[in-house]
Amino acid sequence: MSPAGGLRQLDVSIKGKSYRSASGGAIEVLRELAFTLKAGTVGALVGPSGCGKTTLLRIITGLDSDYTGSVHLPDHGKLGMVFQEPRLLPWRTVEQNVRLGAPEATDADLDALFDALGLAAHRRHFPGELSLGQARRVALARAFAVKPDLLVLDEPFVSLDAALAKHLQDELAVLVTSRRITTLIVTHSIDEAIGLADRVFLLSASPAHVIAEVPIARPREPRTAEELAKIHREIARVLGKLSK
Amino acid sequence: MNVASRLFSLILLVAAWYAGSEVAGERMLPGPQTVALALWDEARSGALAFHLGATLLRVTVAFVIAMALGTALGVWMGRSRLADRLADPWLVALLNLPALVIIVLAYVWAGLTETAAIVAVALNKLPNAIVTVREGARALDRELDEMAHVFRMSRWVRLRHVLIPQLAPYLAAATRSGLSLVWKIVLIVELLGRPNGVGFEIGIAFQLFDVTRILAYAIAFVLVMLAIETFLVQPIERHVSRWRPKAA
């Protein structure tokens, strides 16, 4: 949309996306959904469950081309993705999984990633021998090893216990900050979005569109409970104003 | 314990054979020692190795052709509904065509040639491979497919690391049933129109009512197939399923 640096940012402008239901009627999932995400920043999409977030990610990642509108990926459009489930190849070791996803990654790249994510001891293990939290870390390592132009995460911490989710979230925050990768994360947790993003996009219920954008000051830095409450109030205010 | 019970079962089989030969007489059912001696003679003269080699070569070539083609067609039919609908009647026809009809037609149309023999055997095994692999292709994990797509994995990587490992149990099943099916059909093909091989030898022995030779060649071939199963198929299977949590 904007001419300056238009090549480098993520531009999403979806006019409409419908599914055909089993009974034959069309169900509209997305309508007039548009946002842009500046290069090197983290955007979080937050919305009620079932609002079409996963559908949106499938369109952005090219898995679904049956929609009207346009999506422009940053730079060369190289993607790294962390799905809701780890989606590792169970018959390949942790290291092979990462290498198959990122054939250009060097040994040094992998060493650094495995160290940062606490996976060094598990390189030769098969995914079936890992806990869900460890498998999620492998999925993260694979996505970062690609050195993507756009990193996409679909609820990467869902069904982990709260302490582990927080821990992984911190590790993710360190990685995105140090590598400055344009990142789009989908979550239903406002806390998670505040903890990770430069900019939070609030989605409506289905058919989804962006109802508000909330910039987060000092992204990914420690916050007091007071500051956190303030951001929550701000979001609640934006949502409240819209519902009037 | 395991080995002991297997050994006991084997000894029981030989004993039953021995007893049967005592009752039926050496001509109808020669005893184990007679057959063993005949086997030894055939081995010493080199005839055994020659005929076993010819048969094994045919088994190998026909099996490889049938599995390769069957896997490709099975995956195609398992993934595309249109392909499945188009090819299914052909498959059912081929499945129900008697092996003998295919063999005789192949010989009539292409002459008593090696090519005709191999094609006939491969065609007999093909539908069985297709049906098994098609089941596997229907059960393929879409999620891994999407992952491979998003990470822009090359065709080769997808084939080698995503597709084949998912099909492995089905390929193993098709291999198991396939090897035994193929070698039985190869023998018939040899009996009807080849100048060498175990089937040819058994045909000669049949004309002479030489039961000893029939048993000698049958046992030799069963031993070879047992060796293939133990030293080739099982180790490959163990390697392929090394990632699975060990079952008891």
Image (tube, rainbow, N blue to C red):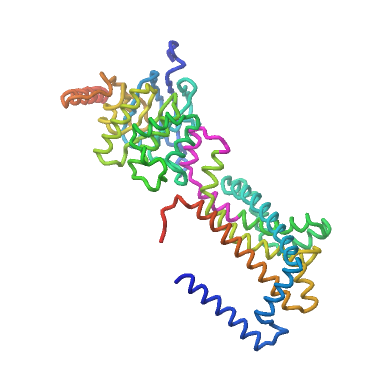
Q: Where is residue A132 in the image (x, y as percent from the top left)?
A: 34, 43
Front in this rendered view, residue B92 or A205: B92
Q: Which residue is rendered at x = 44% and y = 26% of the image?
A: A148
Q: Relative to residue B46, is residue B89 drawn left or right?
A: left
Front in this rendered view, residue B195 or B158: B195
State the residue lying farthest toward the front.
B44
Front in this rendered view, residue B199 or B148: B199
State the residue lying farthest toward the top.
A4
- Quarter of the N terminus of chain B within the rendering: bottom left
Magenta stretch?
Answer: B131-156
Q: Which residue is rendered at x = 20% and y = 25% of the image?
A: A228
Task: Mark yes or no: residue A28 visible.
Answer: no
Q: Relative to residue B196, is residue A36 drawn left or right?
A: left
State the residue lying farthest toward the bottom.
B23
Magenta stretch: residue B135 in it?
yes
Q: Position of residue A99 (x, y in %)?
A: 47, 35
- Quarter of the C terminus of chain B within the rendering: bottom left
Q: Which residue is rendered at x = 27% and y = 34% of the image?
A: A167
Counting labels gives 0
Magenta stretch: residue A22 in it?
no
For residue B190, which quarter of the picture? bottom right
Q: Position of residue A47 (x, y in %)?
A: 32, 31
Magenta segment main secondary structure: helix
Up the image or down, B216 lies above or below A209; here it is: below
Q: Relative to residue B103, is residue A65 drawn left or right?
A: left
Q: Which residue is rendered at x = 62% and y = 55% of the image?
A: B129
Task: Mark yes or no: residue B205 visible.
Answer: yes
Q: Position of residue A212 (x, y in %)?
A: 31, 22
